[in-house]
Amino acid sequence: MFLEKFRLDGKAALVTGGSRGLGLEAALALKEAGAKVAVVARRASFFEEARKALGEDALYLEGDVRDEARLEAIAQEVEEKLGPLTVLVNAAGVSWGAPSLEMPVEKVREVLEVNLVGAFLASRVAARRMKERGYGKIVHIASVAGLKGEYPEVLDAVGYSASKGGLIALTRDLAVKWGRWGIRVNALAPGFFPTRMTEKVLPRAEAFLKATLPLGRPGAPGELGGAVLFLASPASDYVTGAVLPVDGGATAL
Ligand SMILES: NC(=O)c1ccc[n+]([C@@H]2O[C@H](COP(=O)([O-])OP(=O)(O)OC[C@H]3O[C@@H](n4cnc5c(N)ncnc54)[C@H](O)[C@@H]3O)[C@@H](O)[C@H]2O)c1
Ligand SMILES: O=C(O)[C@H](O)[C@@H](O)[C@H](O)[C@H](O)CO
């Protein structure tokens, strides 16, 4: 009875940034639960890794989350090929590290544009469709960096932190605005996970994280997918506007 609620058999799910890293892990979790999965990344050449993991049944769609017209076309194609869009995971994201007093302002703008504006655009493209059916699940991959300040030896990326804080505010506001349409909007706030995004930062931050995190280590591959599945599936149908840290206790400090 309860395990059944984690199933997504035959439901269409779209994952932005699903070509690798945490987005790919999200797509794999949704697929394992029975969803028909589409992933978006900026270039077709980025899909090699995802194809190996997700197989030929998945849809691989090129697109930039800053381009709303392209997102509309993607949603249309997903609905034509996979059926009504039930789940959107916004995992597309970029980061730019530099000391805050020297951070190039164009990098702050770029990061906000992808991580915050892009997630908003993908959400409303999905919500226009979900509203018609009175049901939908939107999951943002935010970050603990959006919930608390960071020492520079852990994360020196002010634009990134601001984008994730904005995404958390957006999660709550859209949850309130869209709840009456049956659309649930929630966010995950991962701590440190080893991916392409963190490969340069992790060696510098690891000793600090081991010494300070309640669980004494960064996240490992496979430790986010279950939380994605919870927020994407009927198991969380009475949850909206929530922010779930998956962070080894970083935000409990
Ligand atoms: N790795 C971590 O420790 C960590 C922690 C918290 C949150 N996150 C978030 O998780 C998400 C996934 O990051 P990751 O760690 O897997 O890194 P990653 O660099 O491996 O993945 C980022 C993904 O976003 C896609 N992307 C980037 N810009 C895009 C754009 N403009 N349009 C479409 N797609 C775009 C990339 O192609 C890639 O698939 C990001 O939002 C990131 O901020 C990561
Ligand atoms: O990519 C991210 O979002 C980063 O990994 C941060 O979320 C760190 O986990 C945090 O700075 C640790 O306190």
Image (cartoon, rainbow, N blue to C red):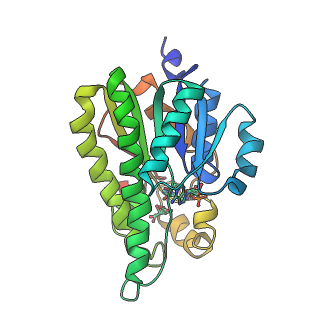
Q: Quadrant of residue 194?
A: bottom right
Q: Quadrant of residue 253?
A: bottom left
Horizontal and vertical percent position of residue 6: 51, 23
Nearer the observer, 206 or 178: 178
Q: Residue furthest right?
A: 52
> Could you tell me how many numbered marks the image carries?
0
Residue at the (68%, 53%) spot, across then down: 44
Instruction: Determine whether, in the image, residue 105 is placed left or right of residue 19.
Output: left
Nearer the observer, 229 or 3: 229
Horizontal and vertical percent position of residue 114: 44, 61
Residue at the (58%, 32%) spot, across then down: 30
Nearer the observer, 34 or 152: 34
Q: Is residue 87 above or below residue 244?
A: above
Q: Image quadrant of ligand 1? A: bottom right
Residue 228 visible to the viewer: yes
Horizontal and vertical percent position of residue 62: 61, 50
Q: Is residue 25 above or below residue 238?
A: below
Q: Is residue 91 above or below residue 151?
A: above
Instruction: Determine whether, in the image, residue 225 is placed left or right of residue 136.
Output: right
Instruction: Determine whether, in the image, residue 8 is placed left or right of residue 56.
Output: left
Residue at the (39%, 74%) spot, across then down: 108
Residue 151 visible to the viewer: no
Instruction: Determine whether, in the image, residue 242 is placed left or right of residue 104.
Output: left
